[in-house]
Image (cartoon, rainbow, N blue to C red):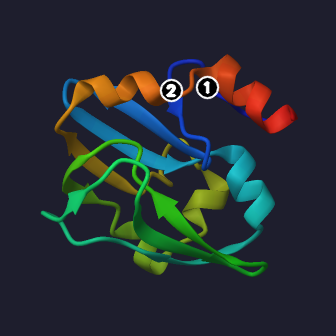
Amino acid sequence: MNIPENLYYTKEHEWSSVSGDIVTVGITDYAQGELGDIVFVELPKIGIETTVAQPFGVIEAVKTVSDLYAPVSGKVVDVNNALVNEPDLINKDPYGEGWIIKIQAENKEEFDNLLDASGYKKLIEN
């Protein structure tokens, strides 16, 4: 299982890549494996406000439907429109082409609540 060291993670299995105040968000390799074949992703509209630990969208797989949770509060500044026609990009490349949204973070202190790679690995091992 792939858990990149340079990313941050939530207990709900989202990953975050931080560049300045822009946070790119997707779901982890572990999460996509548990979900199975992803068939639909509900993307938020650009400009909506996210609240840390609150749903911003929905992901649907053959096995189940699950909410997507914001790792930080802020404003959605970009969405991965490729997922509309190719939701399985998340299965193929969860940390690359399968990214879901980008958020302009309001409060960088919220990053302190995210897990590092070793913390996330411990979470999924338990």
Location of the C terminus (image quadrant)? top right
Q: Quadrant of residue 111?
A: top left
Mark 2 vs 1: CB contact within 8 A: yes
Residue lying at the far right of the rendered structure: 126
Q: Secondary structure at mark 1?
A: loop
Q: Nearer the viewer, residue 85 or 10?
A: 10
Q: Categorize mark 1 by other alpha carbons within 10 Å: few (<14), some (14-19), many (20+).
A: some
Instruction: Estimate the x, y position of residue 120 in percent, counting from the top left.
Output: 68, 29
Q: Nearer the viewer, residue 57 or 38?
A: 57
Against 123, residue 54 (above or below) is: below
The residues bearing labels 2 and 1 have C-alpha atoms spaced at a distance of 6 Å
Residue occupying image coordinates x 39% and y 68%: 82
Residue 92 is left or right of residue 69, and the answer is right
Q: Secondary structure at mark 2?
A: loop
Residue occupying image coordinates x 49% and y 62%: 68
Against 120, residue 29 (above or below) is: below
Q: Which mark is residue 4?
A: 1
Residue occupying image coordinates x 75% and y 81%: 62
Instruction: Estimate the x, y position of residue 64 in percent, counting from the top left.
Output: 72, 78
Residue 47 is left or right of residue 51, and the answer is left
Residue occupying image coordinates x 79% and y 78%: 63
Instruction: Estimate the x, y position of residue 71 in percent, counting from the top left.
Output: 41, 43
Residue 15 is left or right of residue 101, and the answer is right
